[in-house]
Image: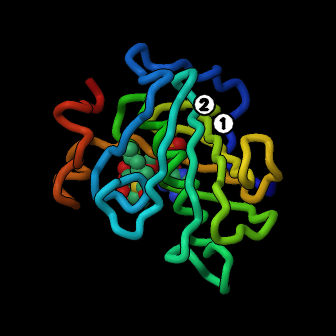
Amino acid sequence: MNRSALTVPPPGTPEPRPHPDALIGEKLGPHYAKCFGCGPDHPTGLHLEAVSHDGLSVTAEFTVGDVHQGAPGLAHGGVLATAMDEALGMVVWLLRKPYVTGRLETDYLRPVPVGTTLHITTRCTGVVGRKAYLEAEARLDAPDGPVAVRGAALFIEVPVAHFTEHGDGVGGMTPDREVNP
Ligand SMILES: CCCCCCCC(=O)SCCNC(=O)CCNC(=O)[C@H](O)C(C)(C)COP(=O)(O)OP(=O)(O)OC[C@H]1O[C@@H](n2cnc3c(N)ncnc32)[C@H](O)[C@@H]1OP(=O)(O)O
């Protein structure tokens, strides 16, 4: 993939380690019921569902519907980037600290028809200070299907005040899904 240095951990960055309380082997669930990416209450959202098996990566599925089209019968590229962003965000959620997307890179390799189920894998490749480095891959219709989209991202750790001062709070992340315990 065409990556900038901004989304690659600097040389010598140690392997990231999962948080001891990371959810492993069970559905991660939505962080906010109205989230466009994962919220079950969003009428036209992506309804992404995800699982982590190691606390540092996530596998997620998203089925492209009529409401996600760009060209007739094909997924909109921005919607695909959103799916990658959301699945990447689920990885940093496992780190149990609040993060936001600072930079998102996407390469589109194949068109994605309506009705396709994208199998998305995202993983953390390093954490340096407030910066988490991540990469993503989306495959068509099966975990080993053809790669349609690749992504990479830099997420930045923020204080909870980021969500309370600029928005209406942190959604379902607290109190039962406490961040930064
Ligand atoms: C569970 C949740 C799931 C959510 C999934 C979806 C995730 C999202 O979509 S989040 C919404 C989209 N993102 C946003 O709204 C973020 C908006 N941006 C901001 O609020 C700020 O610019 C923010 C917080 C990212 C950075 O601001 P600030 O806290 O002042 O940090 P700042 O000092 O500028 O940067 C910290 C470090 O990150 C680096 N950095 C910040 N932004 C970028 C960027 N875009 N590209 C590269 N590096 C960056 C800086 O260079 C700096 O590096 P260093 O420590 O080496 O000097």
| Residue 111 higher or lower than 169, as above or below | below
Q: Earlier in the sequence, mark 1 or mark 2?
A: 1
Q: Quadrant of residue 72?
A: bottom right
Residue 3: where, in percent of width, then height? 75, 53
User: Of helix, strand and loop, which one carries label 1?
Assistant: loop
Give the camera-side residue of 29 and 15. 29
**Amino acid at the residue labelled 2:** Gly
Say few, some or many: other residues with alpha carbon within 10 Å of mark 1 (under 14 / 14 to 19 / 20 or more).
many
Query: Can the viewer see residue 100?
Result: no
Which residue is label 1 attached to? 9
User: Up-down: is 27 above or below 100?
Assistant: above
Residue 16, position as x, y percentages in the image: 58, 23
Please report the residue visible at 54 percent of the width from the left and 57 percent of the height from the top.
83
Residue bearing the label numbered 2: 126
Give coordinates of residue 123: x percent, y percent: 61, 36
- Left or right relative to 136: residue 40: left
Residue lying furthest top? 20
Circle 2 packing at 10 Å, graded few (<14), some (14-19), many (20+), is many
Residue lying farthest bottom? 72
